[in-house]
Image (cartoon, rainbow, N blue to C red):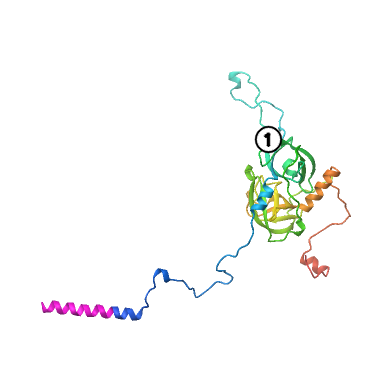
């Protein structure tokens, strides 16, 4: 019995001794309500909380989405043969001719006046037999092609209607790299789609338009580059700034897949205004030629011509 009591006493003394050593060696842990993480290292330029940008796209979207239309183009059949091959014809005799479905495509357009004038891309309506325009409120019209300008890939349409919602012109010359913009259109036939991005670059030449002097085509490219998502069907749609003003006409994407991969291009609205004004007044775009060629100013040319400032 004495041996058991002695062993118990020795174990108790050892346990209390260990607790005492732990108390002095390790600080006491605070309760959950008192814990606060204080990092000793902080990342440079990493704010504690994200700053308020103050940018609200809802007004710009509401001002523009009602003035962007869906443009459906119907093309003539490539063959005049009204019959479709039928392997059972020899067994069941001659059948009635089957009507082939006319090829169609869709794009977008921007209403620029309350009396029904609409800007779109030339490639949206080129060679079309019939052009149909559907408004955001689902009303549909057959549109007249007033004029086309392959050199800028722009076309002007007209529908017979009044009191239509329209977009106010902005000034594309004042657009700055890094400025927020919205792309409004009908990608993949998804009507009234709005995407946001920034102006990535200005005055881009992507060599997408053809030069054909015999047809009067002299490509004019000075695109606004954006990272707003644009896909097939967006062509002819609106690029608007945060105020809802029209600054460009969405036209092209840079992609190896045929779909958006990060870059899209819009025709500056100042160029579009010139084209529209000429198409209305003359039926074609008036351009002057002064007999000079133009090239980009790079470092080699600047050094050759002793030019210090490359812009």
Q: Main secondary structure of the magenta part?
A: helix
User: Does residue 270 show up?
Assistant: yes
- Residue at 12% over, 78% down: 3
Instruction: Give percent across and percent down for residue 14.
Output: 24, 79
- Tell me: 257 left or right of 292: left
Q: Position of residue 251 (x, y in %)?
A: 71, 49
Q: Is 9 within the magenta?
A: yes
Would residue 128 appear left or right of 5 to someone viewing this image?
right
Residue drawn at (53%, 73%) of the image:
42
Toward the front, the furthest residue is 163
Q: Residue 56: which quarter of the image? A: bottom right
Q: Which residues are magenta?
A: 1-18
Whether residue 212 is visible to the viewer of this picture, yes or no, is: no
Of residue 239 and residue 265, the one placed in the foreground of this image is: 239
Image location of residue 143, percent across then percent down:
75, 37
Q: Secondary structure at mark 1?
A: loop
- Image quarter (top left, top right, bottom left or bottom right) of the C terminus: bottom right
In the orientation shown, which residue stands out farthest toward the right? 290
| Residue 35 among those drawn in magenta | no
The residue that mark 1 highlights is 103
């Amino acid at each position: 019995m004495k041996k058991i009591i002695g062993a118990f006493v020795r174990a108790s003394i050892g346990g209390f001794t260990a607790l005492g050593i732990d108390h002095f060696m390790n600080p006491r842990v605070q309760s959950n309500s008192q814990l606060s993480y204080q990092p000793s290292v902080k990342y440079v330029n990493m704010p504690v909380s994200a700053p308020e940008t103050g940018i609200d796209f809802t007004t710009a979207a509401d001002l523009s989405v009602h003035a962007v239309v869906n443009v459906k183009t119907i093309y003539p059949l490539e063959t005049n043969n009204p019959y479709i091959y039928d392997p059972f014809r020899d067994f069941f005799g001659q059948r009635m001719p089957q009507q082939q479905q006319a090829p169609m495509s869709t794009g977008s357009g921007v209403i620029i006046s309350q009396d029904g004038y609409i800007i779109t891309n030339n490639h949206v309506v080129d060679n079309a037999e019939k052009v149909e325009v559907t408004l955001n409120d689902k009303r549909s019209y057959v549109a007249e092609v007033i004029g086309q300008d392959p050199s800028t890939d722009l076309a002007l349409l007209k529908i017979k209607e009044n009191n239509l919602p329209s977009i106010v012109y902005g000034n594309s010359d004042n657009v700055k790299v890094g400025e927020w913009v919205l792309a409004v259109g009908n990608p993949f036939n998804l009507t009234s789609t709005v995407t946001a991005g920034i102006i990535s670059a200005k005055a881009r030449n992507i060599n997408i338009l053809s030069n054909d002097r015999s047809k009067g085509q002299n490509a004019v490219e000075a695109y606004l580059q954006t990272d707003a998502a644009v896909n097939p069907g967006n062509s002819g749609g609106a690029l608007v700034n945060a105020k809802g003003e029209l600054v460009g006409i969405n036209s092209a994407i840079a992609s190896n897949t045929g779909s958006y991969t990060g870059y899209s291009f819009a025709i500056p609205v100042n160029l579009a205004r010139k084209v529209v004004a000429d198409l209305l007044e003359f039926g074609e775009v008036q351009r002057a030629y002064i007999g000079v060629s133009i090239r980009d100013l790079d470092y080699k040319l600047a050094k050759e011509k002793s030019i210090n400032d490359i812009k």
